[in-house]
Amino acid sequence: GSIGGAARLNDDNADVVINWSGGLHHAKKAEASGFCYINDCVLAILELLKKHERVLYIDIDIHHGDGVEEAFYSTNRVMTVSFHKFGEYFPGTGDVLDIGYADGKNYAINFPLNDGMDDESYQSVFKPIIAKVMEHFAPGAVVLQCGADSLSGDRLGCFNLSVKGHAECVSFVRSFNIPTLILGGGGYTLRNVPRCWAYETAVAVGEPVKDDMPFNDYYEYFGPDYSLHLPVSNMENLNSKEYLNRTKEQLIDILREVEPVPGTQIQTGQVESQLAPRGMNMEFDDPSMADGGNASANNPDQRSDGRSDGRKEHPAEMAS
């Protein structure tokens, strides 16, 4: 599952792992929520934190990734970024002003959207925001939740994304060449979910796939077109360019406040996972001259140029 996928990334056995049965982003520590009884996204991120100092979570499900945001709301080692329908819509969270708390302030990024979000509008905000996140946060690993309920025609959704538009998010995230765990999520129009995730699997591994669907046991489910890609609807896009640009600039301003170095330890329940970034209250022994270093055996703070390897130390090297 998702934990196993994260472990494979940690072991450098893959640069991208896919678990379409994962992405249950609503579950909380003490309660089930929104069809989610356990939050595999959070568990996978905790696994990734055993190796990586910073992990980025991106959510393109139509619903706000509230469970994941809540789990990491006060830490600066995980940034959560969610693009979602907002306003009288489950779960009702994810306002643009919800930006994190304490050490996690500015590490929760929320882009609330209205009905009818199409490919062009979505990419006009997704790519600049994610590019700025990569620039300022510099994650060591990414968890990408690809809920398919943001597709056009979803029974519970109200966006107007095509399969290609949805998959463009996967392609853009993969372009940064960061170890990535790709998860599923919502999706309530049965015939469209496998279309989306089959195409995104092809995109993730860099293999082209034909639009014509090959014959299989479920071929009749995909009539009358029997194709991978379907046209979107003609629903109105209620997201004006002014609103999208204003919110985008607001979030970019928040990202400019992100510190370049993580400073908060996070516990994952295992001794070896209590990772503290180097330079944060960590002590290192300087090798003595006998070991090839330039520290005095009697006084570690006293430096000497009499190294056994012949190297000389510049006077400014130890300047504070």
Image: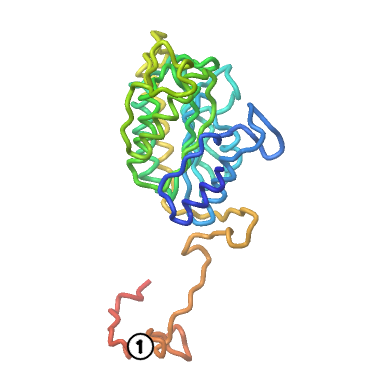
Give the residue at x 54% y 59%. 275
In the rendered structure, the answer to whether residue 308 lies left or right of residue 9 reads left
Give the residue at x 45% y 24%. 216
Query: Which type of secondary structure does the marked residue at label 1 adopt?
Result: loop
Residue furthest to the right in view is: 30
Considering the image in quadrants, where does the C terminus appear?
bottom left
Residue 158: where, in percent of width, then height?
49, 15
In the rendered structure, the answer to whether residue 316 lies left or right of residue 15 reads left
Residue 241 placement: quadrant: top left
Front-lying residue, 258 or 208: 208
| Number of marks drawn | 1
Q: Which residue is mark 1?
A: 304
Residue 6: where, in percent of width, then height?
51, 48
Considering the image in quadrants, where does the N terminus appear?
top right
Residue 87 placement: quadrant: top right
Residue 256: where, in percent of width, then height?
39, 41
Residue 170 sits above or below residue 92 on the image: below
Give the residue at x 55% y 43%. 2
